Amino acid sequence: AQTVTQSQPEMSVQEAETVTLSCTYDTSESDYYLFWYKQPPSRQMILVIRQEAYKQQNATENRFSVNFQKAAKSFSLKISDSQLGDAAMYFCAYIGGTGGGNKLTFGTGTQLKVEL
Amino acid sequence: DSGVTQTPKHLITATGQRVTLRCSPRSGDLSVYWYQQSLDQGLQFLIQYYNGEERAKGNILERFSAQQFPDLHSELNLSSLELGDSALYFCASSVRDPWAGGGNTIYFGEGSWLTVV
């Protein structure tokens, strides 16, 4: 079974600084997709970024980028120029790409605090 | 705005009662998923439908049931409610059937807060 591990329960960053959230996963599949979701205090789940395992290029969405290391099964999220609105719980998630039904597996989350 | 609509946003009900949560997926999405998030808990997958057909079941209690209608909206029915059922219930949708492979991006609604007193 696939597992997703987020080893940092909490992280802090100063406004305008850069922070990296870690995520590792375990899978025997070769085709899969990885996501970062953001859950602000409103508890809404917001898709931040998506990475296809077959792509070598790291995904980027404005101030958010990932460092995808397939061999190491690592998928970290870098937030540049941190803003107060980035404060949220961040979940790393995995879904298999070879079919077999829903396998969207979430990590336990990292609570990000942004300080002035 | 993800395009997934859930109603009601908040609901307070008594133990033993039954409630129905409603979800409209994003336009064009055929798959609907239900997740439960209890306080300080991660997201637990409950059930998934594709084009009206149940496709996968997760940790869904027998007291809970769901269906997806021909217009693709879905309802999650929770009965004989207990205090422990208090949680945030998310509906999510995606274009493809996850059983078909090829990957899927799943978009979440804002959730329905259920409080059982």
Image (spheres, helix red, strand yellow):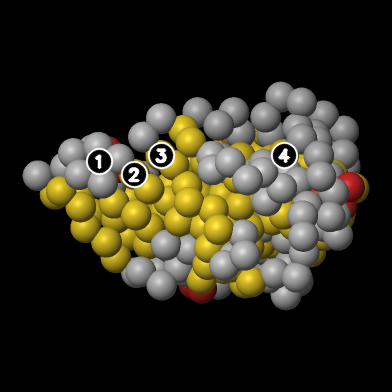
User: Label 2 crowding class (10 Å Cα cut-off): few <14, some 14-19, many 20+?
Assistant: many
Q: Amino acid at mark 2?
A: Ile
Q: Amino acid at mark 1?
A: Ser
Q: What is the C-alpha distance between the residues marked 1 and 3?
A: 10 Å
Q: Amino acid at mark 3?
A: Phe
Number of numbered discs overlaid on the protein picture = 4
Query: Mark 2 touching mark 1, by CB under 8 A?
Result: yes
Q: What is the C-alpha distance between the residues marked 2 and 1?
A: 6 Å
Q: Which residue was labeled with disc 1?
A: A82
Query: Residue A31, located in which quarter of the rendered image?
Result: bottom right
Q: Quadrant of the C terminus of chain B?
A: bottom left
A41 on left or right of A58 = left
Label placed on residue B26: none
Q: Amino acid at mark 4?
A: Ser
Query: Mark 4 touching mark 1, by CB under 8 A?
Result: no
Q: Nearer the viewer, mark 4 or mark 3?
A: 3
Q: Nearer the viewer, mark 4 or mark 1?
A: 1
Residue at 63%, 45% in the rendered image? A56
Q: Which residue was labeled with disc 2?
A: A79
A103 on left or right of B43 = right
Q: What is the C-alpha distance between the residues marked 2 and 4?
A: 26 Å
Residue at 57%, 67% in the rendered image? A72
Q: Position of residue B60 (x, y in %)?
A: 71, 68
User: Label 3 crowding class (10 Å Cα cut-off): few <14, some 14-19, many 20+?
Assistant: some
Q: Which residue was labeled with disc 4?
A: B94
